Structures are given as C-alpha cells and as structure tokens.
C-alpha cells in the first residue's frame, strides 16, 4: 500500500521547525560528503526505486549515488531552506506542489531544464520561470470509501464532499492532519479550492459531524479505516488506493475513490544551488528520474503516476485506479502566501 508521503511531521509544524532550526536529516549511507564521483540525492523517507535501477544508474553514469532521507515533503522543504547556505546534498527529489513555492522563493535551487518526456510539461510548477523544479510523478489526494462496509450496513456510500457533513455519515470519516502530513494538507487545499472563503464553515460542519483528525495518512488508513480493521469507512487517501484493495478473486476492489473534491499532488526534483554542488551529477540524477525505466517503476515502487504519459501502468492500476477528470485548484502563489494562516485557522477549528 502507498507509503509515499505517509508519515507526518509528528508534532513538528513548519513553524516549529523554523523556530527550532532542528535537523531531521537521516541517511541510508553515512559516507563522506559528495565529491566529483559521488552525487547525493536528498529525498523523503519513502523514496523507493528498485536496487537494479540504482545500480544501472551508477554503472551508466559513473557516479556513486548517495541517498539521504528526511520524513516527508514538509520536512524536506524546511530542511533545504534551513541549510541553503550549507548544502546537505546535490539534488533533491520529493518537493511537492503544496510546499514547492516556499523553497523556490528562498532561492534553494539552481536552474535546470532537462528534456521532458511527453506529457510531463503539463505538470510543471506554475510560475517557475527559472526552471527550478522538474516534475517527476503525480497523484491525486481523494476521499476513499469502503464500499463493502456500506453494502453490509445497507447505507448508501457518500458521493462527494458535501455528503460528508450529513448526519448519516456522522463519526464515519477519518482525516490525516493538515499540519502533520502532506496528504492532510492536500485535502485541506481541496476544500479551499472547492468552497473558497467558506472552507472554514465546511470544516466546522465536518468536525461537528464527528470527523476524526489523526496525525498522518498511515494512522488514518491502517488504524481507523474499516478496510484495515478500524471503525471508520471513509478516509482521505489517493486515487490509486483502490488498486490495492482487491477482493479474493482479484476481479474487483472493495473500496473506491470519490472523484469529487480531489487535489493533485506533483513531486518535483531540483538541483541544489551552491558552490559545492556536483552539478553534472545532479543533472544526471534528474535525467535518470525521467528515464522510461524509472518512470515505469514509479507506480509499483512509490504508488504514484509517472509524468511520462506513454508509460504503461500495471494492470490493476489500469482497472481500478480511476483518476478524476478535474481536480480542485489553488494557485501555488496563493498557497505560499496563505498556507500559514490557513493552517492556524484549521488548527483552531479542529481543536475546539
């Protein structure tokens, strides 16, 4: 099941991180700092590319790939901002569109414009005129429902976000926190995109209807969601999640994603800007992430959709990972200016 972007920032909000200046950096390889033969990739803790592809990159490029992992996109962004004058690597993967503008505005990245595979340009960061970031993968955060549970209870499953505030769905919804997980923040942005200035009223109604907010996606999906043995049949997850809830025959799935009110997440890679950066190595890593081999590996290794549109998807994805035709939109510039205020208001609502 999807582990990308699952873990939250624990109690560490972006504000707390900036205030404390603490480091969350962890490494798979605690070897020496990058030199001409080594390129260091900084990423989130759920980065997972098959070992054979990493080995092939090293053999073909001549670089040794060193991987340093942080917690999730939020921790990753904050660490890069805090260390922009004392770089922790050469290239980053995993900055997403809910946090990207913060790092771009802080001047974390050097410009790089690789040749993009067909379809990737559609996922470029809006307003990134300096080619700071390159899109690598994408996915949609959507509400998921346990259709099998609703069938057993003879209750109609909800069809959209408006339904979730109705009494029939009281105490049935679990949500990862917006201040502690990137999918939680994406869902908050989905509601802001859908309801505009009335988003806080929607959340007030959600909370009044018994919606449960937990730290991260894994807490919501693996502890509270009925598919995993919990007592809540509605959860914030991804449009790809139903491909992992197949029945015993493998011919059907017991869950579905509500395609009303989804928010698209895009993960980017970028070259870290500094005098010590292994720039050629960083370029090679980004080119590798865009290669057909890595793009094809992304669904099964990190449960995301490749940005290369001609990439063949696993059979179960083609059958059960239905994607929304439209998603809720919030401009990256607005996210950058309003994120802190939105999170403060959201925290006040869910803490009542």
Image: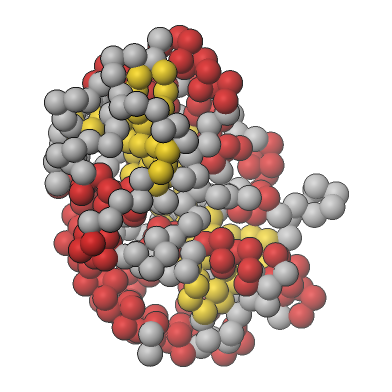
Q: Residue furthest right?
A: 249
Q: Position of residue 10 (x, y in %)?
A: 42, 64
Image side of residue 172 versus residue 127, left or right: right
Residue at horizontal 26 percent and vertical 75 percent from the top = 344
Task: Give the quarter of the image for residue 308.
Answer: top left
Image point (40%, 11%), residue name: 61
The residue depicted at 61 percent of the width and 37 percent of the height is: 300
The C terminus: image quadrant: bottom left
Q: How many marks?
A: 0
Is residue 61 something one can see in this rendering?
Answer: yes
Query: Looking at the image, is 167 positioned above or below residue 324?
Result: below
Please tell me whether residue 348 is drawn above or below residue 311 in the rendered image: below
Q: Is residue 193 visible?
A: no
* Residue in the foreground of this view, choosing between 25 and 213: 25
Horizontal side of residue 156 vs 41, given as left or right: right
How far across and down, in percent of the image, does residue 157 sit? 65, 74
- Between 292 and 181, the one nearer to me in the picture: 181
Q: How is the image coloured?
A: secondary structure
Quadrant of res 289:
top left
Residue 18, position in %: x, y?
21, 59
């Amino acid at each position: 099941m999807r582990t990308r972007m699952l873990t939250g920032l624990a109690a560490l909000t972006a504000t707390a991180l900036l205030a404390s200046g603490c480091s969350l950096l962890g490494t798979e390889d605690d070897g020496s700092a990058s030199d001409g033969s080594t390129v260091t990739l900084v990423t989130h803790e759920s980065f997972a590319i098959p070992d054979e592809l990493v080995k092939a990159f090293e053999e073909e490029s001549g670089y040794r790939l060193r991987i340093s992992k942080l917690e999730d996109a939020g921790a990753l962004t904050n660490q890069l901002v805090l260390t922009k004058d004392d770089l922790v690597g050469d290239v980053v993967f995993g900055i997403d569109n809910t946090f990207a503008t913060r790092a771009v505005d802080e001047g974390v990245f050097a410009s790089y414009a690789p040749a993009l595979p067909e379809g990737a340009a559609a996922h470029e960061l809006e307003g990134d005129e300096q080619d700071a970031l390159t899109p690598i993968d994408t996915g949609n955060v959507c509400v998921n429902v346990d259709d099998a549970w609703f069938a057993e209870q003879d209750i109609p499953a909800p069809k959209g976000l408006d339904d979730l505030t109705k009494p029939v769905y009281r105490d049935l919804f679990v949500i990862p926190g917006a201040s502690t997980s990137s999918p939680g923040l994406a869902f908050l942005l989905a509601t802001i995109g859908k309801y505009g200035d009335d988003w806080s009223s929607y959340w007030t109604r959600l909370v009044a209807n018994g919606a449960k907010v937990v730290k991260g996606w894994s807490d919501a999906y693996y502890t509270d969601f009925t598919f995993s043995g919990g007592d809540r049949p509605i959860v914030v997850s991804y449009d790809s999640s139903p491909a992992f809830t197949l029945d015993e025959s493998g011919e059907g799935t017991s869950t579905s994603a509500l395609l009303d009110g989804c928010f698209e997440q895009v993960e980017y890679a970028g070259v870290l800007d500094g005098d010590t950066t292994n720039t050629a190595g960083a370029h090679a890593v980004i080119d590798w992430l865009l290669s057909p081999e890595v793009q094809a590996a992304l669904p099964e290794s990190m449960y995301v959709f490749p940005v290369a549109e001609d990439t063949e998807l696993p059979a179960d994805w083609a059958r059960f990972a239905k994607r929304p035709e439209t998603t809720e939109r919030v401009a990256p510039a607005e996210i950058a200016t309003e994120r802190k205020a939105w999170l403060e208001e959201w925290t006040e609502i869910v803490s009542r």
